[in-house]
Amino acid sequence: MKPTRAPQTYRVKSFGCQMNVYDGERMGELLAEQGITPAAEGEEADLVILNTCHIREKAAEKVYSDIGRLVAAGKEKGKAPLIAVAGCVAQAEGEEIMARAPAVSIVVGPQAYHRLPAMIAEATRGRRATDTDMPAIAKFDALPARAKRGPSAFLTVQEGCDKFCTYCVVPYTRGAEISRPFNDLIAEAHRLVEQGAKEITLLGQNVNAWSGEDDKGRRVGLGGLIRRLAVIDGLERIRYTTSHPKDMDDDLIAAHGEVEKLMPYLHLPVQSGNDRVLKAMNRQHSAESYLKIIEKVRAARPDIALSGDFIVGFPGESEAEFADTLKLVDEVRYAACFSFKFSPRPGTPAATMEGQVAADVMDDRLQRLQARIAAHQLAFNEASLGKTCTVLVERRGRHPGQWLGKSPWLQSVHFTGDHAIGDLVEVELAAAGPNSLSGRVRTAVAV
Ligand code: SAH
Ligand code: SF4
Ligand code: F3S
């Protein structure tokens, strides 16, 4: 590799979960501190960071096609960008990337990106740099203060996973479960609110496994953290994702009934409705224990919108076992869901299990599951018609005077009127589609 000029502009492309979006923002803030600014829309950046996802094969393969595209564009323009691969593919396949893609200068794992400035300096001297260490949470102390964002902000409170579901790469790419300290989180939340955030979504691979010591030295879980965050003036809405059923404790459930700022939405992945499959997945819960939690959550907050994740075609899944998943979907009546075909991931136990399910069977099951989920989603949206709720304005719509925002139940709502991004607007829900609603503005809420 030849030495190059230090980069002046950057672009981060984040794939995968919201945690990667958060990390992408943090990398940007770190680069801004070095005087490297975001490339203008439509312009080539000097440094491109591919912030990758390893969860399914398709996601992981994307990185190589993206690198190819960057190299081709660089040749055409006679100026190649510095390419950095970050995120979970970097963690899982760092060495392979370096061997397979000579155009990549930097490979940096999700726990090491605070060292990016030094790695960029290495790369400009013509030396390729790799860092996939997993120092326990050191990166947060090394990152600069949060910069200005939109009205809805992410805040990572917990990272990593100790659950080892047999299909999943996350425990390997993100490391062990770690909770960030209470006081650091309160400080970061204050800073986000000062920068204009009205809503904060707390993030973690198992966000409800968060635990810490509050300002009085008491041991608290995520419910305790949410109660404390709710006291912050100017913060209007709190959300959290993603939760594991095993960590859904009574205090967090109670918070749904007691904390007004905690939005009535819970993403609680279940993956399957069949106990044999759940056991083979090492999910550490049964269909019944999952439904019990849902019952408790609904008792605390009757209007709560529920969402989940599903995998179809896990090794050995029979038609009857898949039917149990459909049954569970009907019992819960989800407001939204994410569903995936099983993807065998290298190094995970499920990848080499007996009874791998044929692709056409998986396609068929995914289609049937998604049709069922879509019907419930539409029913949920239709049941909201006539309700008046507060919508947080997030961006302009496609038509003049149109705005888009989220209802408390995380539905996308569009409406027209004289508003601004960040406004909280009282909207009557007037028409429902499967993926969004339209509303009529009642009155703007002063904040
Ligand atoms: N920690 C979260 C989510 C992690 S990944 C949880 O446990 O709920 C997000 C979703 O991707 C998972 O919930 C699962 O539905 C899906 N997923 C993970 N590994 C997968 C694989 N190998 N094949 C298909 N889907 C997968
Ligand atoms: Fe993956 Fe399971 Fe951990 Fe979720 S709980 S990140 S699915 S291992
Ligand atoms: Fe993907 Fe890593 Fe998130 S594998 S889903 S980016 S934790």
Image: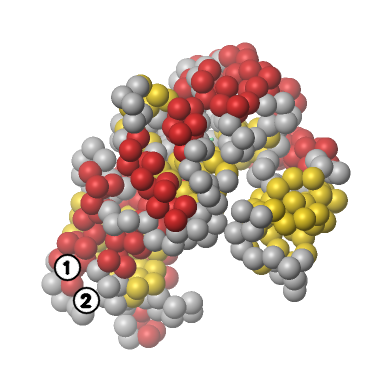
The image position of residue 75, as x and y in percent, is 35, 81
Q: 276 above or below 68?
A: above
Is residue 54 shown to the viewer in this render?
no
Other residues around mark 1 within 10 Å, as few (<14) / some (14–19) / many (≥20): some
According to the picture, the residue beneath numbered tag 2 turns out to be 6
Q: Residue at x 24, y 47 (%)?
A: 141
Name the residue nearer the viewer: 439 or 339.
439
Q: Residue at x 64, y 58 (%)?
A: 423
Contact (Cβ within 8 Å) of mark 1 with mark 2: yes
Q: CA distance from mark 1 to mark 2?
A: 7 Å
Q: Residue at x 86, y 44 (%)?
A: 386
Q: Quadrant of residue 373?
A: top right
Q: Secondary structure at mark 1?
A: helix
Is residue 415 shown to the viewer in this render?
yes
The image position of residue 101, as x and y in percent, is 29, 62
According to the picture, the residue beneath numbered tag 1 turns out to be 121
The image position of residue 337, as x and y in percent, is 64, 38
Q: Secondary structure at mark 2?
A: loop
Name the residue nearer the viewer: 102 or 125.
125
Name the residue nearer the viewer: 171 or 393.
393
Which amino acid does the dot numbered 1 rest on?
Ala
Callout 2: CB less than 8 Å from ligand 3: no
Name the residue nearer the viewer: 194 or 246.
194
The image position of residue 388, as x and y in percent, is 79, 45
Which amino acid does the dot numbered 2 rest on?
Ala
Is 26 placed left or right of 433 in the picture? left
